[in-house]
Amino acid sequence: MIVKKDNMNTEKSLSQQLHEQLGEVIADTPSGGKLPSEPQLAKQLGVSRATLREAMRIFETQGLIHRRQGVGTFVIPPGHVIETGLEVLESLHTQASRMDLEVQLGPYQIAVKDADQKRASLLEIKPGDPLLEVTWVMETQGRPVAFLVDVLPVNVLDRAELQKGFNGSVLDLLMKRPDLMLTTSRTEISAVAAPADIARSLGIQRGDVVLFFEATLYTSEGRVIDYSHSYYLPGYFKFHVVRRVGQGGGPPK
């Protein structure tokens, strides 16, 4: 049970204590094992169920537990993390395969939509022109961990080709095209609060922090042929960048 401290840092101390004690419960539960029910766990830790849920959200986005509605909360087995550098553009499937990590295609949709102003400008077409929009959820161990959207002009990929045996990777399909010379991708990365629709797809709470990638893929002619935006659960992905020391490096003279 959490013991209250009568000082200015009481609220922070209680939060830290709850985080530590809940972490101990999770650590003491075997991988794949089920935690006590929310009422039992709240009583055990001496907090309200609402306070407990807030604490559990942190562990869930870290990839340590998975709450299944109406079933319970389970401890995630270790090792189900995609860790990769960002220097080379690769699909998630390629990265996962290199790490012997099995990923699955979750719910997905392939649709033709009219281009809005932003997408039309990025892809150098007219507003209202048709675009191919591909949305899909990546899963591992039955748990959704990423939500991805690719938007392309309809003449770049055939809808029928996408619908036949689609495994989730638009990038892999584009890389197989002999008539496309892909060269670079410009990507902006940020941490954002998950919108309601993304939160539902990833099985988290609206407002939980997720990693957000917004990217444009270029051909050798400088043409943007793919605009993508993706949401990743932080606990399941570790991205790093290898950086070269600049000319100003070295000891002072």
Image (spheres, grey):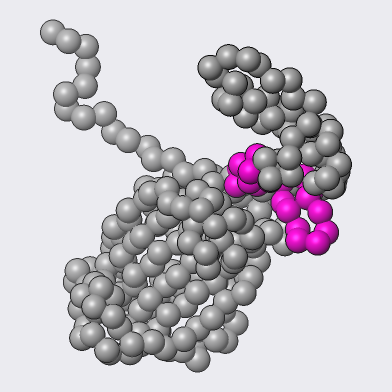
Above-or-below relation of 97 to 34: below
Q: Residue furthest left?
A: 253
Q: Can residue 153 be seen in this view?
A: yes
Q: 107 or 23, which is in the foreground?
A: 23
- Say left or right for 135 vs 219: right
Q: Can residue 27 be seen in this view?
A: no
Within the magenta stretch, is there residue 66?
yes
User: Residue 41: x, y in percent?
Assistant: 82, 39
Q: 192 or 129, which is in the foreground?
A: 192
Within the magenta stretch, is there residue 213?
no
Q: Quadrant of the C terminus?
A: top left
Q: Determine which quarter of the picture holds residue 131.
A: bottom left
Q: Quadrant of the N terminus?
A: top right
Above-or-below relation of 154 to 202: below
- Say left or right for 70 vs 82: right
Q: 124 or 210, which is in the foreground?
A: 210
Taking the spot 28% from the left edge, 80% from the top edge, the residue there is: 116
User: Residue 56: x, y in percent?
Assistant: 68, 43
Q: Determine which quarter of the picture holds residue 179.
A: bottom left
User: Residue 108: x, y in percent?
Assistant: 57, 76
Taking the spot 72% from the left edge, 32% from the top edge, the residue there is: 23
Q: Determine which quarter of the picture holds residue 119.
A: bottom left
- Say left or right for 35 vs 204: right
User: Residue 248: x, y in percent?
Assistant: 16, 24
Taking the spot 74% from the left edge, 24% from the top edge, the residue there is: 2
Q: What stretch is highlighted in magenta?
A: 53-75
Taking the spot 59% from the left edge, 65% from the top edge, the residue there is: 200
